[in-house]
Amino acid sequence: MPDTSTRLGIPFLQAAQAQKHVTVNEALTTLDALTNMVLQSISTATPPAMPEESQCYFVPDSPTGDWANEAGKIAHVFNGGWRFVTPLTGMRAWLADEDKAVVWNGSAWQPITTISAANGATTKTDVVTASHTVTAGATNDTGLIIPERSILFAVSGTVSTAFSGTLASFAVGLPGQETRFSNGLWIGQGSTFVGPSTPEVIWSDTPVRLSAEGGDFTGGEINLAAHVMRFTAPF
């Protein structure tokens, strides 16, 4: 049985143990699967019918078959069956079906978006999010704040509760640039926009602004995201 004192549950050889090769091979197979790991998928809840030895999958919610009751674990093929390992915070993998690198943050696999230098300097692509409840008036400065000293690439959003009021449509921008990201947008629930823009340095914290077109807001809700690049200085 795996010794649970090890981080990856790798078994130890025991004194005077028979068939030591079985334990050694299990340990080597686990290391082979999890070192420079390739996850075939993090969304497939049904085990594949004919997986290859040492292939890895992350088991999502509501798994079936041999993965039942193993949600939240890494399943890797061992001797034609499955072995399950709990992912560790900071564990990295290549996600094969989405063609990107990911890191386990303790609760989910996130894309790896930070480049770090040996002296601590970093460049990070980031998504800043906020939900905003609309208040009455012609404009709303939302709680989505573009952080200072970042480079802004786009703002996106989805109307989660239809906007009410006398408006016919709405625009999304910044103070003084009210239509920068989009305008003429539908006010109904589910209305979605992605507004790329010429990259710009934002020198001070700046709110994203909603503007009513053809009337005023009285209510509604929207989920917003700002797509930015951020930087930190070296040690």
Image (cartoon, rainbow, N blue to C red):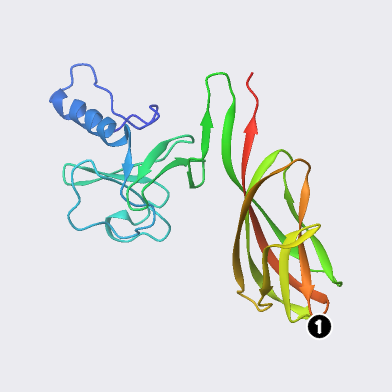
89 left or right, relative to 170: left
Give the quadrant of residue 53: top left
Please determine whether, in this image, residue 90 is positioned above or below residue 155: above
Q: Residue 35 location in percent, x, y?
A: 32, 31
The amino acid sitting under disc 1 is Thr
The residue located at (22%, 16%) in the rendering is 15
Q: Residue furthest front?
A: 198
Where is the N terminus found, in terms of image quarters?
top left
Residue 68 lies, in percent from the top left, at 34, 57
> Split into 4 quadrants, where in the image is the C terminus?
top right
- Residue shown at the point (59%, 25%) measured from the top left: 121
Residue picked out by circle 1: 166
Mark 1, secondary structure of its residue: loop
**Number of residue marks:** 1
Question: Which residue occupies the foreground of this view, 1 or 187?
Answer: 187
Report the front residue among 84 and 221.
221
Q: Is residue 48 left or right of residue 114?
A: left
The extreme right residue here reads 137
- From the viewer's side, name the closer residue of 54 and 97: 97
Q: Horizontal and vertical percent for residue 85?
A: 36, 40
Question: What is the quadrant of residue 218 in the picture?
Answer: bottom right
Q: Position of residue 183 (x, y in %)?
A: 68, 70
Label 1 crowd (10 A; few <14 / some 14-19 / many >=20): some
216 vs 51, left or right, is: right
Nearer to us in this view, 124 or 111 = 124
